[in-house]
Image (cartoon, rainbow, N blue to C red):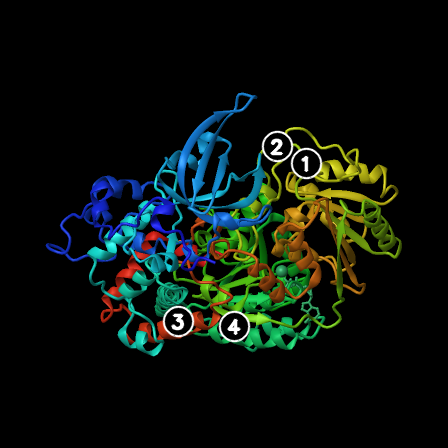
Amino acid sequence: MLTAGYPSDDRVGFRPRLGFGRRLATGLSLVGCSIGFVIELDTPLTRVVEARMAKRLAERPLGLVTVADLLDHLPRRYHQRGELTNLRDLVEGEVSTVHAKVVKHESRQARTGRRFDVLTVTDGTAQMTVTYFNPSRSPARRLPAGSVAAFSGKVDRFRKQLQMVNPETNRLDEDDESDDPDRWARALVPIYPASEHVASPVISRSVRVLLDTVAELPDPLPADLLARYRLVDLRTAYELAHRPESRGDVERAHRRLKWDEALTLQVILAQRRRAISAMATVARPARPDGILAAFDGQLPFALTEGQREVGATIQEELAEPVPMHRLLQGEVGSGKTVVAVRAMLAVVDAGGQAALLAPTETLATQHYRGIRALLGGFGRAGELDETPPATRIALVTGSVGARAKRAALAAAADGSAGLVIGTHALLHEGVAFHDLGLVVVDEQHRFGVEQRDALRARAAQPPHVLVMTATPIPRTVAMTVFGDLEVSTLTQLPAGRQPISTFVVDAAAHPAWRDRIWGRIRDEVAAGHQAYVVCPRISSVAVGRDEEDLAAAGDDEASDAPRRAGKATERPVTIPAEDGSLAGAGVEELLPWLADGPLAGLRLAALHGRLPADAKDSVMTRFAAGELDVLVATTVIEVGVDVPNATVIAIMDADRFGVSQLHQLRGRVGRGQGAGVCLLHTEVDGDTPATQRLANVAATTDGAELARLDLGQRKEGDVLGASQSGRARGVRLLELLKDERLILDAREEAARLVAADPELVAHPGLGRRIAIALDDRPVEFLEKG
Ligand code: ADP
Ligand code: MG
């Protein structure tokens, strides 16, 4: 397309300049280059580029402060001039990218009085107009006549003239080091993530100044590693990434830079593992004649093989004077609770106490009841029906009555309660343990590391820690996000589990399907079963912050899409809307409508965080006892709630939930004799990321597969932490799914490096890189699920 016929200089009307050195005077100058000091990765940019420029680069959102910041600010993509379309060859209706020079810049006024910008641009083959509405934000402001830019957008025609309206616009640097037109056409033009005040070419120029200044960079990766994996050195990698001559250059650069990211991360994790294993704690060996043995003897079911194996591993680790630090992953319903209870009992047998932390009050209370029932007389020391050997179970939540709470706290403090169950209320000052030996964190994704640390601080010596999660996490993510935890996985479900069928109720396309939800629920209830109806919020009208909102806003899980549990609107939603839509309804709107309409005659009740604790309690108890048919609830039922007779769950506005939330919710059914049904209601029309998520959830009940599907559609930054606001520091290039091999290799290399040289004395460059990473991004972030 653009071979010899590429616009010659005079057609385009500008001549690529020789070298760029002359440009330095306009934006940048070198300060004390090469002589006087050595440039390192953490050298401030103020020492390398002109102060004014350094200040602009340092401004948010770029925030580029050090040499490493700027060098790591990699091009978002590259334009190859020769691959671009000639203006002459543009086809109406197609999306194209052209490189062109601005020849006229006008600001016009529409009849409505609104202003807009019109550029006339040319590449020498033809002319085009480029129109930007919304002048205050228009990129045209930075494109005076004479400037050159890449315009990407849909081509249309206005009064016979080709035009693009509001195209994506990247201003380009007109100067180039080469006056060879062929080379010029072949060259890759880096396009940088830019800000309103600092355009891509400015960054490009700063980087070039920097690269030309920095002749050598200390390489943080050990030389033998570079050789073994055939990686280019760091200086070369930056050169190839910022000034590539081919796509191959970019690939080589990326592979090398991914190694930096992966190795840094894995070394940090290896060091943490090492630090944990260097801590001393009290060994809690199991006893053959304790509560655990007695408990095992009267379990109403046989443990699955997985439960037995994980149990044995945990017991071995508890018997060591080194704190256990283990993640127990298991599909929803795989029976993690009994594994945890057995670990807790082993610790109690060894004279210690165990705490179980649950993310919500509902779940804490349910755990308390469930575990009390499971333990029977063994959990009732001091009560009439005590069966020795026995201990006591205490429940500490925000809403336990004052007297009961005092008793629970006393039992925790004097050690008479071997098991202490609670929400984050357990973490508050004033909760003391006699001898805390084990902390179990259930449904870990709701807990940040701060909370875990707070609990750890409750014990004289660091306790053993068992983290449980049903959030499906692919292996490389587990290795990256929970890389300092050893991982066990329960893959089997207990025998007799029923399959769950999932259907997307696409109400926008099939309005009649709405009624089928209610029909299905009536059928199940008629067959003696029970149902959940889940809404994204309590009410369409906002009132304060609720437990659900808190959960939604809390430290979010590793592999969930951003939660859109739904901002409540100003006005209450009337349902159904004129067109029959049920969108936006909260529990408070849906319940009365169902009770008077589609589900009239059934026994319905609401469950959500704004109810008083005793009301919540009574609803749960009645539902568990079969005295209610349908629970209309928020996500309070998301985790752990266990009523085997419930066979159908309808999730309203399911498009507002993340994948792992939906998977968790679905796990509420299929726990008993009847097959489970999950109905994902949505009023969203068409093919959107949200509807794609629903299709994924409907396609498989395999959590790991689901995590894979979901991760494949998301950015790494989302996976590693929502707090990273679009820019995952430290991990920019790594793709946790695609780079599995590299991550595994890096993990191995990191383990070897740290084993041989824990403080990395022999690798000061790597040590420095790690210091920067840790400084930048607190370790909490790595641990946060
Ligand atoms: P989750 O892993 O999702 O936390 P739970 O621990 O809540 O799952 O277990 C779900 C249900 O399965 C509970 O009712 C529990 O009593 C039951 N269960 C656990 N292990 C077994 C087993 N080995 N055989 C039969 N039922 C089991
Ligand atoms: Mg559970």
In the image, residue 57 sits, relative to residue 662, either above or below, namely above
Question: SS for tag 3?
Answer: helix
The residue positioned farthest toward the left in the image shown: 36
Kindly identify which numbered label has been placed on residue 746: 3
Q: Are marks 1 and 2 in contact (CB under 8 Å)?
A: yes
Which residue was labeled with disc 1?
539
- Res 495 → quadrant: bottom right
Q: Which of marks 3 and 2 is nearer the N terminus?
A: 2
Which residue was labeled with disc 4?
314
In the image, which is nearer the foreground, mark 4 or mark 1? 1
Amino acid type, residue under disc 4 in the picture = Ile
Number of other residues with Cα within 10 Å of mark 3, as a class: few under 14, some 14 to 19, many 20 or more: many
Number of other residues with Cα within 10 Å of mark 2, as a class: few under 14, some 14 to 19, many 20 or more: few
In the image, residue 278 sits, relative to residue 94, either above or below, namely below
Separation (CA) of disc 1 from disc 2: 8 Å
The residue lying toward the viewer, choosing from 685 and 17, is: 17
In the picture, measured across the screen, residue 295 lies left or right of residue 113, that is right
Question: SS for tag 2?
Answer: loop
Question: SS for tag 4?
Answer: helix
Kindly identify which numbered label has been placed on residue 689: none
Where in the figure is residue 396, as x and y percent of width and height? 56, 49
Which residue was labeled with disc 2?
543
**Residue at left offset 34%, top offset 78%:** 228
Q: Do the residues labelled 3 and 2 touch (CB within 8 Å)?
A: no
In the picture, measured across the screen, residue 604 lies left or right of residue 367, that is right
Q: Earlier in the sequence, mark 2 or mark 4?
A: 4
In the image, which is nearer the foreground, mark 1 or mark 3? 3
Separation (CA) of disc 1 from disc 3: 48 Å
Where in the figure is residue 460, as x and y percent of width and height? 39, 59
Separation (CA) of disc 2 from disc 4: 44 Å
